[in-house]
Amino acid sequence: MLRVNLLGRYVVKSTGSGAPTRVALSPPTRTAWAFFVRRHTFSGDARNPGAAAREPLHRHPHQVTVLQRASHEHGIASHSTTRQQHITRGGKTSPSSSSARSIHALGRRKKWNDALQIFRSIEEPTALEVRALLGTMAYNHQPQHAMIALRQLQGSGAVTFHDYELAIHAHAKELPLVALELLHKMEREGFGWTLRARGTVLQALGKDGRLNAALHLIDEMEQRNFSPTDLDYLVLIVACARGKSGMRAGDRGGSEQALEFLQRMQDKGPVPDIRHYNAAMKVCVTKGDSAKAISMFQSARDQGMQPNIRSWGALLDAIGKAGQVAEMMAWYGEMLAIGGVLPDLVIMTTLLDNAGKAGEVRIAEGIWSETRDRQLAPNNRTYNALINCYATARQPDKAEGVLAEMVQSAAVKPDAISFNRCVKLCMAVHLTAYGPIAVQEQRSHFIC
């Protein structure tokens, strides 16, 4: 045992069962006093999550006693163990901490139902056990049980900002509007909006296609001197690519909305990087908006960003999807001329797919030859793009030739798309001799 008393300037030392002895200390230096004050003084408001994040929590014994007494008055024991409890247990871990660890472990293994059964078997759950259940339900996205645990902590007066973060996470995936309400309730309870809480809600709204609600939340954040992170904006830009069926009533989405998010980042921060421009150009791909894709690409380069393989892929795909095959190939030539980025199989398949859909057989065959020259092994999507090209040009002989090559390949085998496209082509041009051949091959490979 070693007990230090700076005010009395002595140390009580005991080894084994020997009698304690006092050793005099020299007067404490300023450095020693500063260290003592930092280690044993609460900093800031307990409801200020920023202060808690900046400095580890070191409770004074008197404060621990106050917390335990307050918790017992509300019917939930504190997880802090007193010295008397530790002696009574013979130095062993408290039962509550053992149960909490079991609940946590089951939750991590996705066995939240088993964790719930353990919790229900506890007659008087401690705050530690309730919080373990809350974390387990948040991790497994079980909002109903997470809310029950949160209410227990609220009723006992033991709720913290971290508990609200967990409850918000539990609701974010399936009930983003409830998560938004919890964020506001968190503030009404006296807790500030933490980075984790507001980011979780903002991203959940974006993923659910509720861009108007997300924009309103950004306005509220700015009123509180908060700004979305670069990851928040990235999720929102990606969400702009959702089709009309994925958007909520009144939400626009699309390339215009993605461009507005980029502009908002430029005006208020954080500054967008190449990831945000790539995501915005992918939105242009889904909307067939080649003009905005080119504008975004040029804007990124004007700001000194180096386009990567994803940037070029999104640009080429957006132009190709708009049916502008000649311009797509011109940009591809510029990519090769600039250097620094070598085309991969994804780029070549993108070129081949768009050229094929436009019926540009000569260009498609040139892309196919270049793919082989670059020693890029075609996959199913590459083969199917070439088959689709010949199907669009109504050239069944060549389509059957590509299918035969796939059948003989050791690395790639035809799938249902390959066979069905050939069969439909043969039926469309009334070549009944080819239709049965394709059907027979399909049956032989057990593809439906």
Image (cartoon, helix red, strand yellow):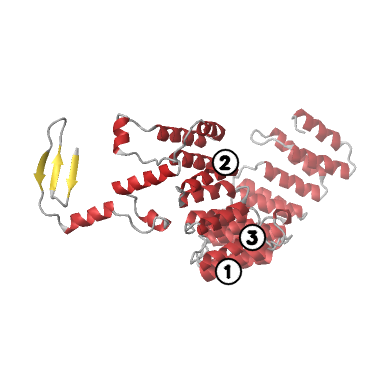
Above or below: residue 261 compared with residue 416:
below
- Return the disc, 2 or 1, that comes first in the chain's sequence: 2
- Determine which quarter of the picture holds residue 78: top left
Residue 409 in sight in this render = yes
For the view shown, which residue lies furthest in the bottom direction?
267
Amino acid residing under circle 2: His
Q: Is residue 361 in sight in this rendering?
A: no
Question: Which one is earlier in the sequence, the residue at label 1 or at label 3?
Answer: 3
User: Which of the image's four quarters has the C terminus?
Assistant: top right
Name the image quarter holding the N terminus. top left
Q: Do the residues labelled 2 and 1 touch (CB within 8 Å)?
A: no
Q: Which of 239 and 159 is in front in this view?
A: 159
Q: What residue type is labelled 3?
A: Leu
Note whether 125 is above or below 179 in the view shown: above
**Residue at coordinates 50% horizontally, 60% vertically from top-left?**
229
Q: Mark 3 points at which residue?
A: 211
